[in-house]
Amino acid sequence: MPSENLFSDGLYPKAIMTRHTLTVLGSTGSIGVSTLDVVARHPEKFKIFALAGHTQTVKLAEQCAAFCPEYAVVADAVHAAELERLLAAKNCQTEVLYGAQALIDIASADAVDGVMCAVVGAAGLPSALAAAQKGKTIYLANKETLVVSGALFMETAAANGARVLPVDSEHNAVFQVLPQGFQRGRLNDYGIDSIVLTASGGPFLDTDLASFDGITPAQAVKHPNWSMGRKISVDSATMMNKGLELIEAHWLFGCPPERLETVIHPQSVIHSMVRYRDGSVLAQMGNPDMRTPIAYCLGLPERIESGVCALDFGKLSALTFREPDFNRFPCLKLAYDAMHAGGSAPCVLNAANEEAVAAFLDGKIRYTDIARVVAHCLEQGFSDGLNDVESLLILDKETREAARQRIAKAV
Ligand code: NDP
Ligand code: MG
């Protein structure tokens, strides 16, 4: 396991002296909107260079009118024409670009200091990698980047002096309670026994297993504690999200799989923990609102205002914990297996899961078929040691095809 410093110039980068210029990828999504909410609270600290949505042109036009970026990116020419019309009506000068290359361009432009990577799914990988190649500060929400290409991404970031700051709440919590100066992979040197990721258990933690076949998309996206995009909400219900996060933690912190734990904590107040050799367990707590980890990353080394309410201990009835049950959450077991298998297994796991979740949300398969589709794709086998983006994207594409064939049979 490499032992380079996780954050190229130490855990706490220098204070932001000048206005930090940002690109927000996925600005129209849940994380994107929370990011802009935090940015709007600190106009003296941040300036938006570019925003990227995909299909939500009305929302993106409103964001452009509010933040006046130089560029806005959408999926294709049709959405670009629509956005141009909306911007003209607002008298907004933002230049409109479209397509995957435009995402890469606004993530790697010289004028940009930091990039919020908040596209959903493996579609976020090329732009995140481009930011790493250009040594940007990367605010990483898109966990799929690390699941698909963890070794490649972390190596690229280290080689180019890019700082990778974890936005995902669990990893952000771990980041906050790691010792200052922590170097990736050197758990023993810092007296760390293990990293413990907490999980809410999602909306079906106590649902009768016999009724799982009938779970609807509307039920699955209704998370008890967090407000998130549809894909990650389904992943939280199946606990695939925690599986993806274990793999994410493995790469971010250089933590061996056997030193990663997960525990269900239904209140989502403790966002994750680090166990130390002396018996101490350090946890980070707060209300479940992504503006806290976003503000922590954007503000480093300062603590900046995020708009999140103070945690009210008087209203907390209990903090409870329990072990995850693989019968209830087979996707978590599949993710554990893929993490232990290593190589390109996590890339296969992710592609199969993205296709299965999309098919479930489209009403094409049952909730319980999600794990079946993923297991089927993992059984097809996977190659070892793929560590270039082209090969990983080919494997991603092939796996999606295998998943779609399995999905067609499930109907
Ligand atoms: P959303 O679905 O809410 O938003 C996704 C964003 O990505 C939207 O801006 C969407 O554009 C854009 N997008 C979708 N497909 C593409 C594509 N093919 N190319 C470019 N852009 C695309 O997702 P979330 O904000 O919930 O999640 C974003 C990422 O952050 C995910 O990786 C998730 O796992 C991670 N994350 C999210 C958390 C949360 O609380 N939401 C917590 C921790 C991590 P449009 O809507 O305009 O079509
Ligand atoms: Mg998370």
Image (cartoon, grey):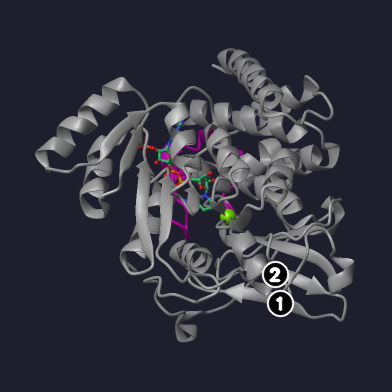
Question: Which image quadrant is residue 87 in?
Answer: top left
235 shown above or below 314: above
Q: Which residues are magenta?
A: 205-230
What residue lies at 84% left-to-right and 65% top-to-bottom?
187
Q: Position of residue 107 (x, y in %)?
A: 48, 42
What residue lies at 49% left-to-right and 34% top-to-bottom?
104
Report the side of 61 relative to 176 (left or right).
left
Q: Is residue 330 visible?
A: no
Report the side of 202 relative to 327 (left or right).
left
Q: Is mark 1 within 8 Å of ligand 2?
A: no
> How busy is the neighbourhood of tag 2: few (under 14 within 10 Å), some, or many (20 plus)?
many
Report the side of 7 relative to 361 (left or right).
right
Q: Residue at label 1?
A: 282
Q: Secondary structure at mark 1?
A: strand
- Label at residue 273: 2
Are the residues at dot 1 and dot 2 in contact (C-beta closer than 8 Å)?
yes
114 shown above or below 155: below
- Label at residue 367: none
Q: Quadrant of ligand 1?
A: top left
What residue lies at 21% left-to-right and 28% top-to-bottom?
82
158 magenta-colored = no
Whole-angstrom CA distance, mark 1 to mark 2, is 5 Å
Q: Position of residue 113 (x, y in %)?
A: 49, 54
What residue lies at 36% left-to-right and 44% top-to-bottom?
51
Q: Is residue 31 visible?
A: yes
Which amino acid lies under the numbered mark 2 shown in the image of this protein?
Answer: Met
From this viewpoint, which residue is outermost toward the bottom?
314
The residue nearer to you, when weighing 263 against 274, is 274
Which amino acid lies under the numbered mark 1 shown in the image of this protein?
Answer: Leu
